[in-house]
Amino acid sequence: MEKRTIANSELVLTPEGKVYHLKLEPGDVADTVFLVGDPGRVRLMSDMFDQVDVRVENREFVTHTGLFQGKRISVVSTGIGTDNIDIVVNEIDALVNIDLDSRQVKDLHRSLNFIRIGTSGALHADIDPGNVIVSATAGGLDNLMHFYGGSYTLADQDMGKAFAKHMDWNMMNSRPYFIHASPALFDRVMESGWFSGITLSAPGFYAPQGRSLRTRLADPDFIEKVSRFRHESVRINNFEMEGSALYGLSGLLGHHSLTICIALANRITGKFITDYQPFMKDLLGKILDKMTRDGQD
């Protein structure tokens, strides 16, 4: 079958032939890519590398690639939200699975590991600010994955229906979807004392996460209902804003992905930590070590 050539308007490149938003070219990213929201967090992690070979910055997207204990690693800042994850994951996939000169998909698929390290708000009193939460499942309150054909097959339909029923979901909102993390990555990094379960990815920081400043909430009981939800004894541990798109796009594109967050705030107890950098640095170091030890790439 003849290969399709992807149009210039669909695969947008810079005049230098780099992917448009990330300003990267083939060879700039490793097979293991850490994703962080804050551009400043890229330097926090790459300072742990033995050497850094690639440093690229454009808008909120900062990329450093280098070596740690003999293994090539990339760390990329995504900014905030599932819309930014849509850009980052698609453009990194294009770098490794599309020939940018011919604009055709390569015959040999390259599978990447995407590990998102972020911050989040915890939804149970037993999760203290500073604790680590690993997202075994990401629930999307956004609508990004509904625009992609095949995303329905990735989603846990039973969990989605149970959540909508429990929440008495307003169908004027986008339909919630739940996608599981890579089991291999989950098993590789999970450790005793960390929390795991469902993470909700919200399409905003305020009302979509039950926060009200000078506006009313459409559902004043939103936080309470979310914290009570259980599916096969699994609860929703936290809110963040990127995991659902990461899991969905990784699944469609044939990559592995996992989200790991520090609880920055507890929405039940009202506790909050302002200086989370020591916790973040410790977590980045631990996951970096887990992803490079025992001769694994």
Image: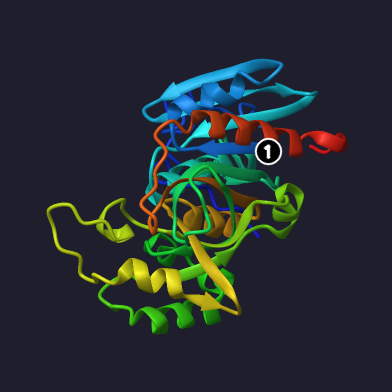
Q: Residue at x 31, y 53 (%)?
A: 204
Asked whether residue 85 is in view, the answer is yes
Q: Residue at x 43, y 32 (%)?
A: 38
Q: Nearer the viewer, residue 12 or 166?
A: 166
Question: Which secondary structure, mark 1?
Answer: helix
Give the farthest residue toward the right: 294
In the rendered view, does 196 fall on the left or right side of 50? left
- Image: 294 above or below 5: above
Q: Residue at x 47, y 59 (%)?
A: 125
Q: Residue 175: where, in percent of width, then height?
A: 38, 73
In the rendered view, does 208 fall on the left or right side of 118? left
Which quadrant of the figure has residue 179? bottom right
Q: Residue 273: where, in percent of width, then height?
A: 42, 38
Q: Quadrant of the C terminus?
A: top right
Q: Nearer the viewer, residue 80 or 145?
A: 80
In the rendered view, does 12 fall on the left or right side of 212? right
Q: Amino acid at mark 1?
A: Ile
Mark 1 neighbour density, 10 Å: few (under 14) some (14–19) many (20 or more): some
Q: Residue 249: where, in percent of width, then height?
A: 53, 55
- Tag 1 residue: 287
- Image: 234 above or below 8: below
Q: Residue at x 37, y 61 (%)?
A: 142
Q: Residue 268: where, in percent of width, then height?
A: 39, 59
In the rendered view, does 175 fall on the left or right side of 22? left
Asked whether residue 291 is in view, the answer is no
- Image: 141 above or below 22: below
Give the farthest residue toward the left: 214
Which quadrant of the figure has residue 7? top left
Q: Nearer the viewer, residue 213 or 188?
A: 213
Q: How many marks?
A: 1
Q: Quadrant of the N terminus?
A: bottom right
Which quadrant of the figure has residue 35? top right
